[in-house]
Image: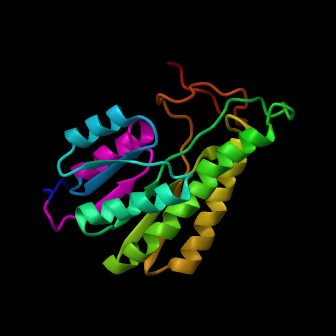
């Protein structure tokens, strides 16, 4: 049921929400009555445009991989709206590499992907939890991937990062519940502005024709 956004409406912070899955999540939450903090690290114009489209929304630029920016992202959300009820950790990055290309998966690529996908998710959770507890019914949703559960994904570092998010979700759910609920969603292939093909499809999976 769609409800009207008010000053008492719940607040959601959706990282990496200027396009793709994050933008769709932000639109859905706004339609359900949430005031949404839209975020991106680089796509400022797209993020601002989405926030302007959604009732009661606000855009905040910030890179979740940077500790100070991650904390500031949460702080600015709470300063703007006065509360935080839901954190959606959607921000992520990847490279497209065949899983057999061990030389191609350089330490630099590993660090870049893990910094955003794993450490960034952790930093956002750590910064948000005190505010989520304060609402009495806070929630975290981590956007994982089928690549974290099956031998698939755009690259080995990406798949490993999503497997780490899955286990992080289990650990945090046990540690923080029932004060804060922690869950993950693991989508399969979705038609988004990101990579459309993978050299490493999961057994039994096919890319949807465009």
Q: Name the image quarter holding residue 46.
A: top left
Q: Is residue 127 above or below residue 176?
A: above
Q: Can you say which quadrant of the picture contains the N terminus? A: bottom left
**Residue 129 screen position, x and y as percent:** 45, 73
What range is drawn magenta here? 6-31
Residue at figure coordinates x 66%, y 44% from the top left: 113
**x then y, percent, for residue 57:** 23, 50
Number of dots carrying numbers: 0
In the drawing, does residue 156 fall left or right of residue 86? right
Q: Which x, y percent locates residue 192?
A: 47, 30
Q: Residue at x 20, y 64 (%)?
A: 9
- Residue 178 in view: yes
In the displayed structure, 20 sits above or below 121; it is above
- How far from the left and from the top, in percent, is residue 203? 73, 36
Q: In the image, is residue 22 part of the stretch drawn in magenta?
A: yes
Relative horizontal placement of residue 158, taking residue 13 as reference (left or right) = right
Instruction: Give the residue drawn at x 13%, y 61%.
Output: 6
Residue in the picture at 62% in, 45% down = 146
Please tell me whether residue 75 is drawn above or below residue 153 in the rendered image. below
Left or right placement of residue 141 versus residue 75 in this view: right
Task: Report whether residue 150 is seen.
Answer: no
Q: How is the image coloured?
A: rainbow
The residue lying furthest to the top in this view is 210
Q: Residue 78's quadrant in the figure? A: bottom left
């Amino acid at each position: 049921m769609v409800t009207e956004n008010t000053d008492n409406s719940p607040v959601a912070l959706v990282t990496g929400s200027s396009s793709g899955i994050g933008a769709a999540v932000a639109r859905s939450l706004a339609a359900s009555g949430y005031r949404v903090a839209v975020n991106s690290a680089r796509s400022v114009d797209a993020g601002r445009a989405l926030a302007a489209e959604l009732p009661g929304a606000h855009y905040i630029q910030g890179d979740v991989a940077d500790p100070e920016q991650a904390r500031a992202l949460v702080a600015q959300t709470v300063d703007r709206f006065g509360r935080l009820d839901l954190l959606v950790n959607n921000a992520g990055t990847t490279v497209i590499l065949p899983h057999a290309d061990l030389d191609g998966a350089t330490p630099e690529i590993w660090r870049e992907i893990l910094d955003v996908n794993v450490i960034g998710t952790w930093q956002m959770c750590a910064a948000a939890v005190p505010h989520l507890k304060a609402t009495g019914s806070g929630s975290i949703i981590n956007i994982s991937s089928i690549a974290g559960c099956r031998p698939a994904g755009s690259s080995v570092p990406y798949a490993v990062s999503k497997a780490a998010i899955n286990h992080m979700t289990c650990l945090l759910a046990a540690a923080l519940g029932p004060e804060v609920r922690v869950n993950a969603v693991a989508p399969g292939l979705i038609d988004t502005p990101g990579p459309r093909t993978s050299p490493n499809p999961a057994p039994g999976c096919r890319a949807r024709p465009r």
